[in-house]
Image: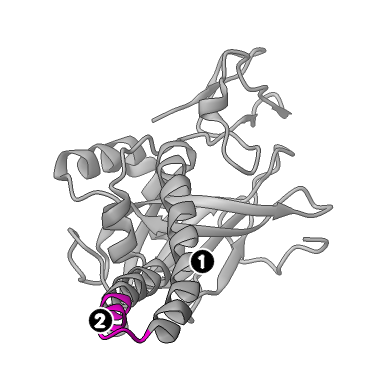
Amino acid sequence: MSTFTCGSCQKEWTENYCHDCGQPIQAEEHLTEDDICSDGSVASLPARVRVNPFRYLWFEPEARSFYQAWFILIGLMIFTAYIQWWVLAGVLLVIWVPITIYLGLIFKYVPRLYKKCLLTPAMVVSQRPLEFIALVNMDAGTGEPAYAIKREAVPLLPFHSHEIGTLFPCVSSFNGTGESGRWTYFSPVPISFGTGDAEVIEKCMDRLGDAEFAPLLEAYEHGNYPTDADETFWLDEKRGPINIPRNL
């Protein structure tokens, strides 16, 4: 598990904040562009997983619909060109080009997501429909922890059991900060969407360890998690429920 070492007391923490000294821990100067996420942050525990973009396109629900449409349009263009319906073939081509550009952007984005962004604990909480929860620290650099649990629905969860209580690793990206200094939104994606390598997934589980999964399990046992998909439940430093922070 990656840790941050306080320059004053030399104690290590899993976040860039020393609770003994009450001050942020500055990021090390040797960090390079390869360590910085697209939002400008540096993950305390980056996933560092080599992803298969084609696998991601197949398992990620939104990307999969575009991926399937891309193949269907190719087939239709070939057919309409064969029967010489050139106008229709042209229309299909106009539709196919932006989808191709969109998929190309995903190909460029996904490797960075799985390499740089935050390795995140997650757990299955529903089988029908298949849904999971993931917990992260939403602090964007103030040193004041603000935890959030998000519930996500997925059609498939490759590699892992769908039994309620199944623990697995995700990678999370973050968006936007308000006056509160907290991230406003995070999006967890299963590691298994990007790779089916058992050794890689097990390594991610080991890097998270019991310490990262314990707060998630505690929140679940106390019912402090969303009941509906795509909702976020906010927790305080002690993982108790709080109102959604203002100025987000």
Image coordinates of residue 239 in percent, x first then y, are: 56, 56
Q: Which mark is residue 10?
A: none
Image coordinates of residue 48 in percent, x first then y, are: 37, 34
In the shown orientation, is residue 157 left or right of residue 151?
left
Q: Is residue 131 visible?
A: no
Q: Badge 2 is on which residue? A: 79
Residue 186 lies in the magenta-colored region = no
* Residue beneath the point at 45% across and 77% down: 90
Q: Point out the stretch of residues depicted in magenta.
A: 76-85
User: Residue 86's image quarter?
Assistant: bottom left
239 over 108 or under it: above or below = below
Report the amino acid beneath label 1: Pro
* Residue beneath the point at 61% across and 64% down: 234
Secondary element under disc 1, as helix, strand or loop, is: helix
Q: Badge 1 is on which residue? A: 98
* Residue beneath the point at 46% across and 35% down: 45
Comparing 118 with 125, the one in front is 118
Q: CA distance from mark 2 to mark 1?
A: 20 Å
